[in-house]
Amino acid sequence: MTEASLVIVTEKIKQKLTQGASLNARVKFDFGDDGCIFIDATQNPPVVSHDDVEADTVLRCSLDTFVAIVTGKQDPNVAFMMGKLKVQGSMGIAMKLNSLLED
């Protein structure tokens, strides 16, 4: 995966946030060496950046896995159960993200 993939996924998240319910939380998707996406949904509209800062909930996975999730090729629940997706922090927020990310 490339930096272009991170940009594409970031745009897809921004689109989904405009359609989705309010999270009212700070969330980080951590892709290791491939970077991260930070969402501050305590603000309206939510702020999406690539800043590596503290978040209420952190989801860790490979960028490949995340691309598969946001494009509908990978079920986030299955990814979690298989250990491809790890959650640190609030599972409630993670569940809200689950419904937001599914295509």
Image: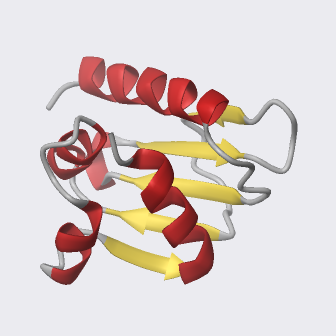
Name the residue rendered at 67%, 63% in the picture.
55
User: Which residue is painted at 38% across and 21% down in the image?
Assistant: 7
Count of numbered circles on the image: 0
Q: Most extreme residue toward the right, as rendered? A: 43
From the viewer's perspective, tell me whether residue 77 is left or right of residue 39: left
Residue 9 is situated, as x and y percent measured from the top left of the image, at 36, 29
> The C terminus lies in which quarter of the figure?
top left
Name which quarter of the figure residue 75 lies in.
bottom left
Residue at x 84%, y 50% (from the top left corner):
42
Residue occupying image coordinates x 27% and y 17%: 4
Q: Position of residue 5 (x, y in %)?
A: 25, 25
Does 35 sit above or below residue 80? above
In depth, the one of 67 and 20 nearer the eye is 20
The residue lying toward the viewer, choosing from 93 and 86, is: 93
Residue 63 in percent (x, y) is at 23, 45
Q: Is residue 55 left or right of residue 96?
A: right
In the image, residue 41 lies at what x, y percent? 75, 47
Quadrant in the picture for residue 89? bottom right
User: 101 above or below 88?
Assistant: above
- Residue 29 higher or lower than 91, as above or below: above
Q: How is the image coloured?
A: secondary structure
Image quarter in which the N terminus is found: top left
In the image, is 12 to the left or to the right of 91?
Answer: left
